Image (tube, rainbow, N blue to C red):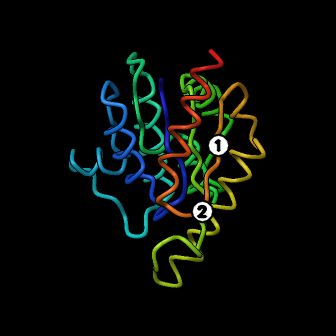
Amino acid sequence: MRIAVSGTHITGKSSLVEALGACLPNHIIIPEPYVLLEERGYAFAHPPTVDDFVVQLRQSLMTLRRRSSNLIVDRCPLDFLGYIYASPDADRFDLAAWQGEIERAMRSLDLVVAIQADPTHDPAVPDEDLELRLAIDGILREIVDGDSLDLCENVEILSLGGPWNRRLESVLAHITTREKRA
C-alpha cells in the first residue's frame, strides 16, 4: 500500500509516519522532501520562497515515481501547493504547467492521510507561526477535502484531526477496513 501523510507543519505528520512504519514493517519510509534536500546540501531561504517549495514539489514528484508498492511518504505534492499558495509571491507559480504530473503522482497513492491543524491538540508554537499554520491548513483543506484544484480524483483521503494519540489507531483501522473490502 502506498500511503502519504499530508498536512501543514507541526501537526504530527512525521510522528505518524514513524509510527506507521513500526506497524507496517514491509513498508519503506520516505522522509519529507525538505529533509532529503537539506541532507543533499540544498540551502533553503528563511523564510522559504516559492522557489524552495517548487524544489520540494519536484522532489515529492520524483519520490512518487518509485515503483515500490509499499511506501509511507511524509508529505505529498498537495502539501507544497498549500505552501506555495500561502506564499506572498504565489502568483509566480503556474499550476497548469504541473497539473498533469501532480495528478499522475497523486493517482499512484492508495491513501492520503490528511492531518488537519487543531490548535486545541497541537503543541504550542509561537503566535506568528500559528497564523501561518492555520492559513496553510485552510488552503490544504480546500485542495484535499474540497478538491478545489481537481487533483484528488480517484485518491482515497482519510482526514484526521483531534488528539495525536488516536491518529495511529484511526489509520490502522481504516487500512484494515479497506483491506477487508478489497
Q: Secondary structure at mark 1?
A: loop
The numbered mark at residue 94 is 1
| Residue 90 against residue 145 in the figure, above or below | below
Look at the picture and state if 20 lies above or below 101.
below
Q: Amino acid at mark 2?
A: Gly
Q: Position of residue 147 (x, y in %)?
A: 75, 41
Q: Quadrant of residue 22?
A: top left
Question: Rounded to the nearest whole Å, what is the CA distance between mark 1 and mark 2?
Answer: 34 Å
Q: Identify which residue is drawn at 48% across, 26% down.
A: 2
Which mark is first along the chain, 2 or 1? 1
Residue at 59 percent of width and 47 percent of height: 114
Specify the amino acid type for callout 1: Asp
| Mark 1 or 2: the one toward you | 2
Q: State the residue in front, 29 or 140.
A: 29
Please name whichever residue, 138 or 54, is drawn nearer the observer in this view of the structure: 138
Residue that label 2 marks: 162
Picture coordinates of residue 17 (x, y %)? 39, 45
- Left or right placement of residue 155 versus residue 84 in this view: right
Q: Give above or below for 53 relative to 174.
A: below
Instruction: Name the residue at the bottom extreme.
Output: 127
Dot 1 alpha-carbon crowd within 10 angstroms: few under 14, some 14 to 19, many 20 or more:
few
**Left or right: 115, with 23 as reference point:** right
The residue shown at (44%, 37%) is 60
Labelled disc at residue 166: none
Give the total of numbered labels: 2
Quadrant of the drawing holding the C terminus: top right
In the displayed structure image, the side of residue 55 where residue 148 appears, left or right:
right
Residue 12 location, x and y as percent?
A: 45, 58
Q: Nearer the viewer, residue 58 or 143?
A: 143
* Side (left or right) of 164 relative to 180: left
Question: Badge 2 local density, few (<14 within 10 Å), some, or many (20+)?
Answer: some
Residue closest to the eye, 130 or 85: 130
